[in-house]
Image: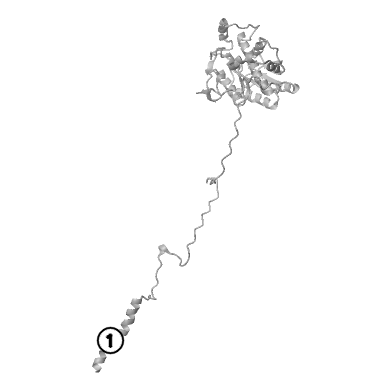
Amino acid sequence: MRKKILPWIKVCALLSILVPAILAGCIGQPDNTYEETPDETSEVTPSETPEETPPEEEPPPDSDTPEKVESSPSPQPSPTPQPNTAIIADHTIIHHYESLSSSTISAIQDLHIYYVHTSHGSQIMTGLHMLPHSLPYFHEVESDLGHNGDTSWEDPARRYLDNHPDCDVVMMSWCGGCSDNTKQGINAYLNTFNQLEQDYPNVIFIYMTGHLDGTGVNGNLYARNNQIRDFCYKNNKILFDFADIESYDPDGNFYPDEDDSCNWCDTWCQTHNCLSCRDCAHSHCFNCYLKGKAWWCMMAEVVKRHRSFISDSSPQFLAGVPLTASFLGYGLPYTHIDSQSFKLI
């Protein structure tokens, strides 16, 4: 009997050891000696929502980093450019002479004019005397614009204007001083004349080009005259274009190599009726005659703009000179004027 029970005791003892181990493996109890290593690539704190990364602050603007432009209203339109108000009295205005009204001529005759000139400048006076109108008061000074930056004419002009506040107009002409001048010399003339204009704002100042000398469009005179034209056009001045008037006959034919004697005038007057004169210094009477007409047309526009008693309905011959180089003797549009020559297109 004992022999039969002993094996079962051994079996039961073995089962008491094996059964708990088997049951523990089936239930999956953790081994208390093992610590799980978290995955370093996907570490997340339990029961916490990942915080949002705040936006990075922009660095303050400096001289090297362009400033960020935020949305802004459309820019305001630029002011409307002011029209050019230069008065360029050249050969193209002479045909308006016949249309001058009596009220315009009367207003011109009321002017007080200070005119500095020598022989070439006297051509304007000769031309005026060839026409039927009585003249305004001219205070004529026997001098001219000199040579190479000479501005000795400035102080006498200031003294006269200081002593004659009723003076309306200042004109000064060249003799031969434009032909042999330099860029710097012409700038001295323009700057000094312009300063007079600024210092006496109630006086009208009339600029001039120099007379022809036969050197043509490649000569120094042409460059210096263009320098004066450029300045007057860009700065809304009044210019009596002495040289341009000498360069064209009434049919519009251009004589680029003409000189102050006006050889084409003699040819023209052989087939046309031309007035005679006692003397037109250095030139032909017809040249003086044309300059006299051009002067009246120029002054018609001057008094229309500057004298309130001229009716607005009067012809406005020269208002807003068109953007052409007609006063150069070419009649072609230009893109830019420099001190040496006009660049034509």
What quarter of the picture does the N terminus occupy?
bottom left
| Residue 327 pos. (x, y %) | 57, 19
- Residue 304 in sight: yes
| Residue 203 pos. (x, y %) | 70, 23
What kind of colouring is applied to the model shown? one colour
- How many numbered marks appear? 1
- Work out whether 306 lies above or below 72: above
Q: Nearer the viewer, residue 7 or 159?
A: 7
Q: Which amino acid does label 1 sit on?
A: Val
| Residue 52 pos. (x, y %) | 49, 59
Residue 251, quarter of the rendered image: top right
Residue 75, quarter of the rendered image: top right
Name the residue that disc number 1 marks: 11
Which residue is most to the top? 270
Q: Which of 251 and 310 is in front in this view?
A: 310
Which residue is most to the front? 313
Q: Which residue is drawn at 30% across and 87% down?
A: 13
Density class for disc 1 (Cα within 10 Å; few <14, some 14-19, many ≥20) is few
Q: Which of 86 and 307 is in front in this view?
A: 307
**Left or right position of 271 against 30:** right
Element carrying mark 1: helix
- Residue 185 in sight: no
Which residue is most to the right? 163
**Left or right position of 297 against 42:** right
| Residue 210 pos. (x, y %) | 60, 17
Q: Which residue is drawn at 26% across and 91% down?
A: 6
- Work out whether 162 lies above or below 128: below
Residue 162, quarter of the rendered image: top right
